[in-house]
Image: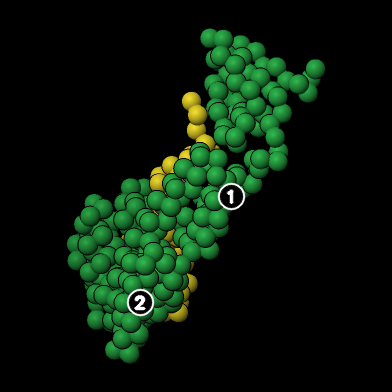
Amino acid sequence: MGSRVFPSKSIAPLLTEYFVCVKVNVDRPPGAAEKLFEKANGNTLPLILFTTPDGAFISNTSGFRDENTFKADLERVLTHPSLRLSDEQEKKLAASADQAEKNLGAKEFGPVIRAWKESLYVKGFSDSKWKLKDLAERAVAAGRELLQDADSLVKADKQADAVTLLKKLQTDFRGTELEAPVRAALDAIEAVKPSSAPSPDTVILKDGTKVSGKIVARSEQLIMIQVPGGKFVKIEKEKIAEIQSEAKK
Amino acid sequence: MVLTLVAALVLQAKSDAPTPAHWMTSFKDAQAKAKDLGRPLIIDGSREA
């Protein structure tokens, strides 16, 4: 389970956001854990135990659990009465979820992400907390589509528009899985501003095709050349007959 | 083969694996953290630890 189930897409975020995880040697459990293992049903490894935040035994699984089964196990634990929010907390979170839903409908993704992140600091679980998580996931999916729109703008030589869009994404999706690719995309566009006109390197392929621009990266198998307009062309080295560089002339 | 760097990053964003959970090895520290954060504790009992 450690190599396939725990790192999977549906399990890892649940473990990271909602649980505290610890591994113990079942043959030599630490004192406090030993009493918990005595309450477990089954003896097929791995034995996975769940406790309340105060350390009281909730339930356990015994033996291998596939991704879907283990996801259901985790979700069941999160409905345990000890983990329910107080009525007041739930009321606040429900209002926050309703507002986030309206924000999502209006394509205002930043407030959705912020509401979800704030909910992570609220101890306990509820339908509203799950709703905020779902809304945040839908916002991130929409953000991913916008990242593709930014790519289309770059292809259409509308770098300035792409940068505007990406900066908005950077603000709205800070702290999500989109943060790194958005930042990298901005860095990439910054590196190929029109003012940095390509110098005339020419790559001549074995089939006679010539590609002119500026060589910006080389690896063992590939070179990447930036052509006029800012686009990149990757060329496999084995297809190259000759590289002519003005700088060497 | 023309591929913009941004397109490559879009693909990367789609295929990114989720951040793996951090598995603590000190039971005492894990208990304290669970209480502090108000989160349930999950204890993986195996012979690998």
Question: Is A120 situated above or below A214?
Answer: below
Colour displayed for chain A in the image of the structure: green
Chain drawn yellow, letter?
B
| The furthest residue to the bottom | A88
The residue positioned 71% from the left and 38% from the top of the image is A196
Q: Secondary structure at mark 1?
A: helix
Pick the front one: A2 or A201 = A201
Q: Which mark is residue B6?
A: none
Pick the front one: A69 or A181 = A181
The percent coordinates of residue A142 (x first, y second) are 38, 56
Q: Secondary structure at mark 2?
A: helix
The percent coordinates of residue A154 (x first, y second) are 53, 42
Q: Which residue is mark 1?
A: A160
Query: Are callouts 1 and 2 both on one chain?
Result: yes
Rounded to the nearest angstrom, the CA distance separating label 1 from label 2 is 32 Å
Question: Is A67 situated above or below B44?
Answer: above
